[in-house]
Amino acid sequence: MSDHDYRPKSKVGQWFNDRLPLLTLANHLTDYPTPKNLNYWWTFGGILTFCLITQIVTGLTLAMHYIAHADMAFESVEHIMRDVNYGWLIRYIHANGASMFFLAVYIHIFRSLFYGSYKAPREIIWIIGIIIYLLMMAAAFMGYVLPWGQMSFWGATVITNLFSAIPLVGEGIVTWLWGGYSVDNPTLTRFFTLHYLIPFLILGLVVLHIWALHVPGNNNPVGIDIKKPSKDTVPFHPYIVIKDGFALLMFMIVFAFFVFYAPNILGHADNYIEANPMVTPAHIVPEWYLLPFYAILRSVPDKLLGVVAMLSAILILAVLPWLDTSKIRSAVFRPLYKQFYWILVADVLILGYVGAMPAEGLYLLIARVATAYYFLHFLVILPVLGFKEKTLPVPLSITEPVLGGSPNLAAARNKESKIE
Amino acid sequence: MSEKKTKRRDFLFTATTAVGAVGAAAVVWPMIDQMNPDASVKALASTEVDVSSLTPGNTLTVLWRGKPVFIRRRTQEEIDEARAVKMEDLIHPEKDEDRAKNPEWLVMLGVCTHLGCVPLNDKGDYNGWFCPCHGSHYDTSGRIRKGPAPWNMEVPKYEFVDANTIKIG
């Protein structure tokens, strides 16, 4: 890339850059050639970075007031809400920030699914992304345990018990995770420690995610390889910075709506009851962002197989680049895939809905059908589609469909070469 | 280089790696084992419960090792119902006679063997317990009959210290 030849203008800058090339990095980031046709679905990378920073900053400040002890955690959270200056604001930002983080990450993931961003040469970016997603789920789960309410306690009990499904060593692992014979103070303190650690692991992986992205460059709505830099690209700054900034502003409006007008709508009232190991709440449900996987867990009538199905539903995403056999990236040129894509979106939403409902009767039946379809999509439809589907002709460049107004592709190409 | 010298090096590499691996494992193990139940947790191993106030058809729930324990004084119908069940109808076959040595008293961990919720008393299709989390039904002997739980509710080690006192653990 050309930016490796970068030389700072000032003497001091040159002196510094020769010793630590941070200015070269900054120059790479500002000049980074970006496809000029990126739409607003591409702004969620920036939004997610904002979410991560928000969670780290609010989490850090909450940790100054929170007490990780089974006898005091619940009260310390109420103390934050009532006594600490702006404690209510910081906690509501942190709690709703988790939901906003997942909202953004789901849009980000489904954008990749639609435009085939996971395909060669971007498999490593995708896999790092899936690891980040797994860590996000772990962090969110452990964070939800910290207020030590009824949902915290029983959520922790149910999720840690998933490990007891492992044959032979399962029970031992669960005792080890708990540090006792049930979820109790040792569990709370270690969850707090890990909840504090994970965001920084995520931060490190985000750096790798972006680094891996900057090797091939961004995918784009047309899904073709482009020359960089060329007339198909614009520099990241100011073009993408401004666009990302505007999208972030829109996102923050939604964020602020939840924080100020409906701060508890995404939570459960049961979590304002202190943890009680003697009584399980009548209806245990995880947070909304985990519901599809929860539905998959419950749709299988066998304990071990249910856990296996749930984990597979997430891990199957990691091998997606090899399950999708189509060479065409963007769904824009894949008429059949586009339809299956939207069926998958509906399928996941349905799983999320039945995950929140009691696992019986019609809900259970729907959950089973939707679970079967989820796996069918990845294991059968995607591999077969790559061979059977008749894709539409893909343009040679981003500029071509715009400048070459005529349906005659050859003419359009001609025209373009003249401009070049 | 001669063959002999290469072999000597190979030995040194292997030996160094092996000693290094043992050393690393010796350091890692305390880091892992510190998460297991500590001495103070293990010390709370047994509880004594006064059951004199319990009348037939009622259940007492006590906390033992952080987990609820159901102590059920069963009615004659419940005992009959539990003893009449055929072994082949059970998901996890266990005789009621083995689960409740003294048929009137059923003592077991009130923990669903699916994912650890506390089942509800006098509920479900088998007049025993019903777990509200994922819908497991238990009979009057606490045996799993329907739903995702793989095993019967666990009977802990317990004994009657005297006629009115049960010692759990």
Image (tube, rainbow, N blue to C red):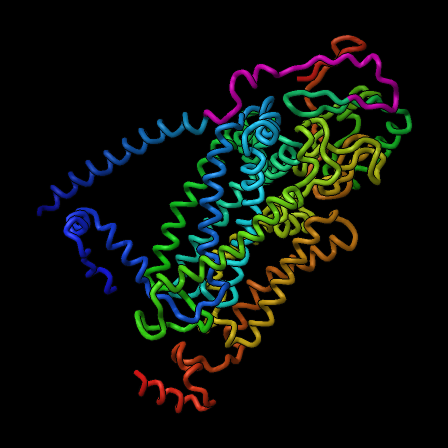
Q: Position of residue A21 (x, y in %)?
A: 22, 51
From this viewpoint, which residue is outermost toward the right? B77
Q: Nearer the viewer, residue A320 or A201?
A: A201
On the question of residue B124 being in view, the answer is yes
Q: Nearer the viewer, residue A345 or A370?
A: A345
Total numbered labels: 0
Q: Position of residue A116 (x, y in %)?
A: 47, 67
On the question of residue A167 being in view, the answer is no
Which residue appears at 30% of the width and 82% of the height? A420
Which residue appears at 91% of the width and 28% of the height? B77
Q: Position of residue B26 (x, y in %)?
A: 35, 27
From this viewpoint, which residue is outermost toward the left? B1
Range of the magenta residues? B34-60
Q: Position of residue A213 (x, y in %)?
A: 37, 59
Q: Is residue B38 magenta?
A: yes
Relative placement, left or right, of A339 versus A134 is right
Which residue appears at 70% of the width and 36% of the height? A270
Relative placement, left or right, of B122 versus A291 is right
Which residue appears at 73% of the width and 40% of the height? A283
Task: Please determine whether, in this image, residue A303 is positioned above or below residue B94.
Answer: below
Task: Please determine whether, in this image, residue B142 is positioned above or below residue B9.
Answer: above
Q: Nearer the viewer, residue A347 or A1?
A: A1
Quadrant in which the C terminus of chain B is drawn:
top right
